[in-house]
Amino acid sequence: MRLPQFEYVEPKTLKQASKTLASDKRTVALAGGTDLLVNMKHRVIEPKRIINLKTIPKLNHVAAGKEGLRIGALATLHDISSSLVIKERCPALAQAAREVGAYAHQAMGTLGGNLCQGNRCRFYNQSAFWRGVRPPCFKVAGKVCYVVPKSKECHSAYCGDLAPVLIALDAQMKIAGPEGERSLPLKKLYTHNGIKPLSLKKGEILREILIPPSSGKTLYLKWRFRDSLEFPILSLALHIEKDGKDQVKNGRIVFSAAGRGPVEAVLAEKMMKGISFDEAMIERISDQAVKEISPMRTSIHSPAYKRKMAGILLKQALEQLRNAK
Ligand SMILES: Cc1cc2nc3c(=O)[nH]c(=O)nc-3n(C[C@H](O)[C@H](O)[C@H](O)COP(=O)(O)OP(=O)(O)OC[C@H]3O[C@@H](n4cnc5c(N)ncnc54)[C@H](O)[C@@H]3O)c2cc1C
Ligand code: SF4
């Protein structure tokens, strides 16, 4: 499959990149290209101009300090999975990066691209030829959704591996834009709107992620049929901090491939506060979390199967962290 024609820009600074990005609706940012270029080959998106962020210096750092871990948006997934400081301080993040696609995706793909990747749907992530047999759906300015035919919205799913872990760790993001820089919690990047899944404004570029220090333990469990080259059928990040009496002080449960953005099971999280785990409690928390996800048939796997796997993964994760100090 061939790429369509496009103009190509190599900016030297973030400011220049963000100005160019803001100048025209059909200009897009390129990082590793492992998501964007595939979508362009499928003619899912046809940008007029591409801005290569990789030509901007100092955006691929991994630095540890008192305020936590700072990771540049252009750090590759391989940089993340092989970084000693990330392996030591955030092993779940290193593991999530190691589980993305195959090695080529990890060598080329970046943190920023992973977090900003497009939502997915089996009726959308297809070649133009495949899609051409039926009228376009909402995602491509059509008038129908083939996944939920009675709906007036797009239900495409967010399937990234790194966002659940980073949201569970309360990560903050730094965004550079034409009017300067702003900081906000990573979870606010996701709008849960299938057509425009990210809250980035015109010309904005994700510059850095900050992971604050945490005393808890984090796990990332990804369910898929093959060990590589596969998006999660469903995945889960669980973060638990305990107090001196072995009771849960703070717990976070975040799923991927379970909705239109990363899905946090907030009611199940509340149930965890102040408890010590036992079999019955683990069962109740998992049952509650499953009620909070809303998977649709955006892949070959049924929503019922995804819900079942969500419960199983969460029980496994809670069991693993049950005895963790
Ligand atoms: C076969 C295959 C398997 C895959 N498997 C997985 C998987 O298992 N898990 C998974 O999470 N992903 C998977 N991916 C998707 C993709 O490879 C990864 O998500 C990768 O990390 C994307 O990063 P990138 O740098 O290549 O992004 P790009 O393709 O360069 O960009 C992706 C999107 O993000 C935007 N973008 C990039 N950087 C920034 C930034 N700094 N600020 C604002 N916007 C930005 C781009 O404009 C584009 O819209 C897979 C892809 C393929 C083709
Ligand atoms: S969920 Fe519906 S509208 Fe969205 S991409 Fe799939 S078929 Fe199209």
Image: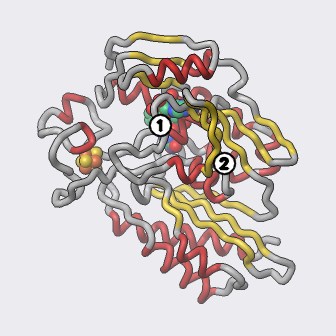
Q: Confirm whether residue 91 shows in the render.
A: yes
State the residue position of label 1.
Answer: 201
Mark 2 Cα-neighbour bin, 10 Å: few <14, some 14–19, many ≥20: many
| Tag in front: 1 or 2 | 1
Q: Residue at x 46, y 73 (%)?
A: 290
Q: Nearer the viewer, residue 289 or 198?
A: 198
Toward the bottom, the furthest residue is 280
Horizontal side of 19 relative to 244 (left or right) equals left
Q: Position of residue 235 (x, y in %)?
A: 52, 57
Q: Picture coordinates of residue 298 (x, y %)? A: 31, 52
**Mark 1 or 2, nearer chain start:** 2
Residue at image position (78%, 71%) is 324
The quadrant of the picture occupied by the C terminus is bottom right
Name the mark on residue 298: none
> Callout 1, which amino acid?
Lys
Provide the secondary structure element on which disc 1 rests.
loop
Residue shown at 12% from the left, 39% from the top: 135
What residue is pinned by disc 2? 172
Q: How is the image coloured?
A: secondary structure
Q: Is mark 1 within 8 Å of ligand 1?
A: no
146 and 300: which one is in front?
Answer: 146
Q: Secondary structure at mark 2?
A: strand
